[in-house]
C-alpha cells in the first residue's frame, strides 16, 4: 500500500479543479491520499478540501511567508515531509511546474511531467514534441514525483467524500523561509469570466481579429459563460493578454465546447485543445488546418458571423 | 557578472516529426536541427544584459555529441563570448542534465544562469528548477521581463491568470518564456567570425557525475487523431447542431 501526497492549489476558499483532478490521478497508485494545502491561513480551504472524494487526510501548512508561496519555500516544505511518502503528485500547473522539479532534484529522482496516463509498475504516458508523439516511460526510482495533465483525469467530486465522511485535518510544521527569494507583486487579470483552464466553454481567437479581439469575442464568451482564449499569434501581436494563450506552451484546455474563431490551427495550438469535447471552427479560409479537427465548421467572415451567433443564441 | 546559458540542439520547430514504424522513438534522421527556441531567447537576454553593461561575460554550454557544436556556434554568432561542449553520446534526461550543468556552474561560478523554460522535444520543463535546487539557489521560472538591481534579479513571471513578480538573490536561475525578448537575426559575417571563437570540449563522463537515465523509455506512439467533422452553411444550422446533436448548449 503506497502513501501518496498531492500538492494542492487553491484560491483561498476551495481547491482548484486541477487539484481535484490530481486527486483522481493519485487513486491509480492504490493507497491513501494526503492533500497538502499551503498558505497563510488555510482553515477554510482545508475544511472544503476535507470533503473532496478520495482524500484521506488534509495537511495544513500555514505560515505568514506562504501567503504568496515561493518555489524555494514550498519545495523545502514538501521535502520536510517527503520521507513519509512513496508518491508526490500535483497538477501540471505553473505552480507545480515551479516547485516539483526542485523537490525531485533534491530527492535525486527523475520526474515524469504532464503525465496523461498512469499505468501499473510506475509506468507513465506523456506527450513530447508538442503533443505530436506520446512517450511511455517507466521510472526506475524508488520514489515517484510527477505532475499530471488535469484535463485527462475526471475531477474528484467536491463536497462528497465517500459516505459523507470528512477527511482528518492535520497541521504540519513549516520550515523557516529560505530567504533566497521574495514575492514582490502580482497583476491578476480581473473579470467575471471563468479561468481558462477550468471553463466549460472557451471562445478562442486568432490574429485576424486584430484590435477588435475583445469587442467581437467578449460578447460571445459572456453569452456562453465561457472563458476567452487566444492563439500565440494573437498574443504576440498584442491583441490579447499573455495568459489567454492556448496551446502546448500556453494553457491546455479540454472544455465541453471550444469555439475557435479565426484560428488557423497550428500544431502547438491543436495540441492544447484536442481533448475538448466539441470543437467548432469559424474561419474565412476553407483550407485552414483547424477544420481537420473541428466537429463543426463554418467558412464565413468572422466580423459578421460572431455577432450573428451571439444573436442566434438568444 | 558572468552569465551561463545552456543551449540544446533540437529538431527545428518548423519540422513536423513522425514516429518510427517500430515505435521505438521519433524519427529524426535527416531532419533539420536548430537551437531550442527558448534557449535562443535565453542567449538573447544574456547578451542584452552584457550590452547594457550589467554583465561582463556570456558563456554558452551544450551537452551532447559533437553535432551540438552547431548550436554553440549559433550562440557565439549571436554574441556569446565563449562556449563549452560537454561531449557524450549517452541518452540525456533532465535530472542528469541538471547534474552536469551544476558541475560546470561550480567551476564557472556564474552570478546568473538563464535557461530556456523547456526544450521543444522532450517538453519536460525541469532543468532550470532542478539546477537551482542542486546549486542551492533561488529561481524565477517563466520570465517575461527581467532586471538586475541591488544583488537581486527581479522577474515578472507568466502564471495562470496574470503576472507574478518575484525578486531572487544572486546567484540565481531564471527560465526564459516566449515573450522575454525576440532574439536577433544572426548575420552571415557573424557566423563566420563565430568559427574563430573558442569551444572548449570536455568529456561529460570525466566530470564524475552520474547522469544515467532513470526513466526507461518503453515506446513512442502517434497520438490518436481527431476526426474532421462537418462543414455547416449557416449560424442557425450551427446553433441547432450544438443544441440538438452535441448537446453542449
Image: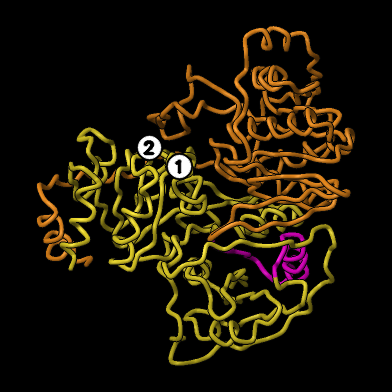
Chain colours: A yellow, B orange
Please state, as top left, top right, bottom left or bottom right, where the C terminus of chain A lies in the image: bottom left
Q: Quadrant of residue B47?
A: top right
The lab-note entry on whether marks 2 and 1 share a chain reads yes
Q: Are marks 2 and 1 in contact (CB under 8 Å)?
A: yes
Number of other residues with Cα within 10 Å of mark 1, as a class: few under 14, some 14 to 19, many 20 or more: many
Rendering coords of residue B61 (x, y %): 75, 28
Label 2 element class: loop
User: Is A74 colored magenta in this rendering?
Assistant: yes
| Vertical comparison of A69 with A168: above or below | above
Q: Which mark is residue A266?
A: 2
Check the image and name the residue furthest to the bottom: A164
Determine if the magenta segment contains residue A235.
no
Span colored in magenta = A68-91
Q: Give the letter of the chain under mark 1.
A: A
Residue B68 visible in the current orientation: yes
Q: Quadrant of residue A69?
A: bottom right
Residue B91 in view in this figure: no
x and y percentages locating residue B238 in the rendered image? 14, 55
Q: Is residue B122 above or below residue A28?
A: above
- Gap between marks 2 and 1, in whole Å? 9 Å
Amino acid at each position: 500500500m503506497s502513501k501518496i501526497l498531492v500538492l494542492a492549489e487553491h484560491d483561498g476558499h476551495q481547491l482548484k479543479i486541477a487539484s481535484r483532478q490530481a486527486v483522481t490521478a493519485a487513486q491509480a497508485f492504490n493507497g491513501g491520499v494526503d492533500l497538502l494545502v499551503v498558505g497563510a491561513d488555510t482553515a477554510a480551504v482545508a475544511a472544503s478540501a476535507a470533503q473532496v472524494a478520495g482524500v484521506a487526510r488534509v495537511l495544513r501548512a500555514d505560515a505568514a511567508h506562504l501567503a504568496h508561496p515561493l518555489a524555494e519555500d514550498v519545495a523545502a516544505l514538501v521535502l520536510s515531509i517527503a520521507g513519509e511518502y512513496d508518491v508526490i503528485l500535483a497538477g501540471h500547473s505553473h505552480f507545480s511546474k515551479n516547485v516539483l522539479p526542485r523537490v525531485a532534484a533534491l530527492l535525486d529522482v527523475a520526474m515524469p511531467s504532464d503525465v496523461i496516463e498512469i499505468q501499473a509498475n510506475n509506468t507513465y504516458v506523456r506527450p513530447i514534441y508538442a503533443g505530436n508523439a506520446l512517450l511511455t516511460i517507466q521510472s526506475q526510482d524508488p520514489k515517484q514525483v510527477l505532475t499530471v495533465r488535469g484535463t485527462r483525469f475526471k475531477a474528484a467530486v467536491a463536497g462528497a467524500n465517500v459516505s459523507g465522511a470528512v477527511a482528518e485535518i492535520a497541521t504540519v510544521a513549516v520550515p523557516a523561509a529560505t530567504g533566497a527569494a521574495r514575492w514582490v507583486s502580482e497583476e491578476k487579470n480581473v473579470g467575471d469570466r471563468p479561468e481558462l483552464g477550468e471553463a466549460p466553454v472557451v471562445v478562442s481567437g486568432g490574429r485576424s481579429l486584430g484590435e477588435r479581439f475583445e469587442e467581437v469575442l467578449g460578447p460571445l464568451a459572456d453569452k456562453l459563460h465561457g472563458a476567452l482564449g487566444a492563439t500565440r499569434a494573437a498574443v504576440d501581436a498584442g491583441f490579447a493578454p499573455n495568459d489567454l494563450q492556448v496551446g502546448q506552451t500556453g494553457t491546455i484546455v479540454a472544455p465541453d465546447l471550444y469555439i475557435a474563431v479565426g484560428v488557423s490551427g497550428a500544431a502547438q495550438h491543436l495540441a492544447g485543445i484536442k481533448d475538448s469535447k466539441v470543437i467548432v471552427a469559424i474561419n474565412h479560409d476553407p483550407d485552414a488546418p483547424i477544420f481537420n479537427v473541428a466537429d463543426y465548421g463554418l467558412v464565413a467572415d468572422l466580423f459578421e458571423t460572431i455577432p450573428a451567433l451571439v444573436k442566434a443564441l438568444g | 557578472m558572468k552569465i551561463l546559458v545552456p543551449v540544446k540542439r533540437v529538431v527545428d520547430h518548423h519540422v513536423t516529426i513522425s514516429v518510427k514504424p517500430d515505435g521505438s522513438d521519433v524519427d529524426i534522421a535527416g531532419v533539420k536541427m536548430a537551437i531550442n527556441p527558448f534557449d535562443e531567447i535565453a542567449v538573447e537576454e544574456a547578451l542584452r544584459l552584457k550590452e547594457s553593461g550589467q554583465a561582463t561575460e556570456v558563456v554558452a554550454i551544450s551537452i551532447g555529441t559533437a553535432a551540438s557544436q552547431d548550436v554553440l556556434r549559433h550562440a557565439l554568432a549571436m554574441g556569446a563570448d565563449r562556449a563549452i561542449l560537454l561531449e557524450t553520446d549517452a541518452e540525456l534526461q533532465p535530472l542528469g542534465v541538471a547534474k552536469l550543468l551544476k558541475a560546470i556552474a561550480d567551476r564557472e561560478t556564474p552570478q546568473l544562469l538563464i535557461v530556456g523554460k523547456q526544450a521543444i522535444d522532450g517538453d519536460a520543463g525541469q532543468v532550470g528548477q532542478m539546477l537551482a535546487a542542486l546549486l542551492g539557489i533561488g529561481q524565477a521560472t517563466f520570465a517575461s521581463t527581467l532586471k538586475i538591481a541591488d544583488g537581486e534579479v527581479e522577474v515578472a513571471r507568466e502564471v495562470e491568470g496574470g503576472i507574478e513578480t518575484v525578486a531572487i538573490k544572486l546567484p540565481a536561475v531564471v527560465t526564459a518564456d516566449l515573450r522575454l525578448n525576440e532574439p536577433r537575426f544572426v548575420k552571415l559575417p557573424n557566423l563566420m567570425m563565430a568559427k574563430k571563437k573558442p569551444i572548449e570540449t570536455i568529456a561529460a563522463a570525466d566530470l564524475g557525475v552520474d547522469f544515467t537515465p532513470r526513466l526507461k523509455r518503453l515506446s513512442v506512439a502517434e497520438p490518436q487523431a481527431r476526426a474532421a467533422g462537418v462543414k455547416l452553411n449557416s449560424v442557425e444550422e450551427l446553433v441547432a447542431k450544438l443544441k440538438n446533436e452535441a448537446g453542449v448548449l
